[in-house]
Image: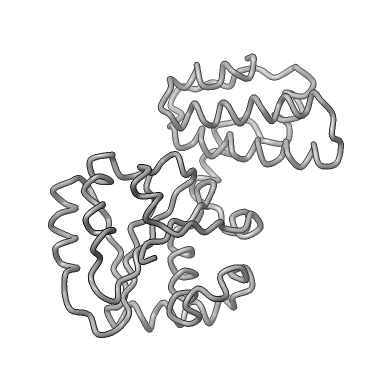
Amino acid sequence: MSTGVILTQTYIDYLHLDKLVTYSFFETEFRNWPGINLFDDSLVDASWSKYHNSGCIHTLKIENKDDYRVKVQGLYKNYETKQLVLFGYIGNLDISVQQAMLKLLEEPPKNVQIIIYAHDLNQLLPTIKSRSQIYNLPISLILKHLDKELLATVKKKLPGPVDFCNSLIAKKAELPDLKDIERAEIDFWLWQNLYYAQQIYAAQPLEQIAQVILGLTKAYNYNNSNLQKKLALAILGL
């Protein structure tokens, strides 16, 4: 397929991910995708510079549907060599833009590979999912290349995930102050908590830990569905 959806599960350093995708596409044609964790950073950076400077990479930052039309129209050319179109994180695009994307996905220009990033397949219209190849990003790579700015912000504003997970398991957790907390920050923080809860469960598979994982999963999904922040976290019993 000419469209790939890469599941990142949470906020990652998207520039680094762009570079990894570029290397995998141009140098291996995605054959070595499962080994993306093993790519040498110097080779990845060199590949990015080479293909970015040659105009083979198109990073589309879309503001709205009209902006989409203008930028996508510029892609319809007769490309003689392979081209990579990076749309970035689907969570930054509203439904009207996704709907407008269908024509491009159905009839992409020749030699064009389209890449979209998503945290969850539920963020995508079913028609986009059906036209895409799905790639899962290794969890070890995600942890290695988390968005550093967001990581620092969440660390400053919200309880540490290890301590908070333990307090949830002990049923001593309290609802953090959500004033001035952005939805993306809660999304990232819940994902961190869910990851650490799963690590605790792997070492100690107890029912109360399984219930905490279930609650965190529901809260994460509710937050992603734009439910009010306080209500999304209420499922944790706080």
Rendering quarter of residue 5 = bottom left
Q: Is residue 235 above or below residue 33?
A: above
Q: Is residue 136 above or below residue 58?
A: above
Q: Residue at x 32, y 80 (%)?
A: 82
Q: Residue at x 32, y 73 (%)?
A: 57
* 83 on left or right of 74: right
* 57 on left or right of 77: right
**Coloured how?**
one colour
Count of picture labels: 0
Quarter of the rendering occupied by the N terminus: bottom left
Quarter of the rendering occupied by the C terminus: top right
Q: Is residue 168 above or below residue 45?
A: above
Near-viewer residue (238 or 107)? 107
Q: Residue at x 51, y 21 (%)?
A: 232
* 64 on left or right of 207: left
State the image coordinates of residue 201 (x, y, percent, origin top left): 80, 36
State the image coordinates of residue 48 (x, y, percent, origin top left): 41, 77
Q: Residue at x 23, y 70 (%)?
A: 109
Rendering quarter of residue 77 = bottom left
State the image coordinates of residue 37 (x, y, percent, origin top left): 62, 68
State the image coordinates of residue 123 (x, y, percent, origin top left): 41, 40
